[in-house]
Every structure is written in C-alpha cells, then in structure tokens.
Amino acid sequence: MILDGPFELDPTRRYSVNSMSFKMARRIGGISVGLFAYFGPYVVQISALFLGECHAGEVSLIKPGVNFLTMESISMLPPQCDGVVLVAWGEPRDFFDKEFTWTKVKESYHGMKLVLNQYEELTE
C-alpha cells in the first residue's frame, strides 16, 4: 500500500537522503514501511523498517549519518531519480482491534518528513 507520494524529483539532479521519518497515530505492528526511489521503469528500496512491536508516534528510517536498513552513513538516490514513494506491506495488526485493516493503517498515517540534500557531481 502506498502511504505517501509519489513525490516527483528533477532527474537531472543528484540527491541523498539526509533524514526520513513518518508518524503513526495508532500502535500498529506486523508491517514494514519503506522509502523507495524510482527512475524510469525501475524502483529501488532506499530504506525500510519492520514495525513488529506495534509502533506509534514518530518512526525514523534514516537519521543524519545512519540508514537503519543498510547501516550506511550516506543514503544516495539513484542517478536520474524521478521521485520517491513511501510504501507499507505485511500483515497489519493492532492488539486492541481484531478487525484491523489497511484502511485503518492509512487513517493512522500522519505524514512523512523527508529531508534531501541536492548536489552536483564533479566532472573531470
């Protein structure tokens, strides 16, 4: 399920992700949430996190200096990146709601904070 986006980017520019977080109003578990970048017909995963123990509030996938998926200090978007999208997948659950659905996940989603660094590559 697409939680947010897609957000278009200028494919002639290069980007790195400085930080990325999102907010969930309810304590939701059993799903993964990831930031994906697309360029042309291709899509690549930049970062993701499994919400296994029912997270609520702000959840960070990337903080300055660390991508929690790759443990790398720089999270580059691919060359000619057209945009990014926040996606969720898995089997959502809420311990207090036995009939929890993806619609309730989407209603619980309260926005993403994405900070990109834009740069130009040096050419020789």
Image (cartoon, rainbow, N blue to C red):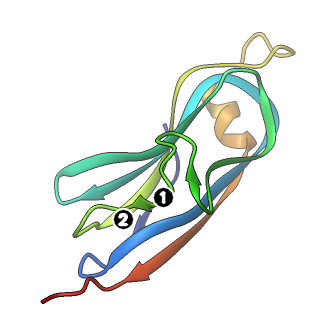
Name the one closer to the observer, 85 or 15: 15
Q: Residue at x 51, y 56 (%)?
A: 73
Q: Is residue 9 visible?
A: no
The amino acid type found where label 1 is placed reads: Gly
Q: Is residue 99 above or below residue 5?
A: above
Residue highlighted by disc 2: 83
Crowding at label 2, few (<14), some or many (≥20) Cα neighbours within 10 Å?
Answer: many
Q: Quadrant of the C terminus?
A: bottom left
The circle on residue 95 is none
Mark 2 and mark 1 residues within 8 Å of each other at the beta carbon: yes
Q: Residue furthest right?
A: 96
Name the one closer to the observer, 113 or 18: 18
Q: Is residue 79 above or below residue 106?
A: below
Secondary structure under tag 1 reads strand
Residue highlighted by disc 1: 5
Name the one closer to the observer, 45 or 124: 124
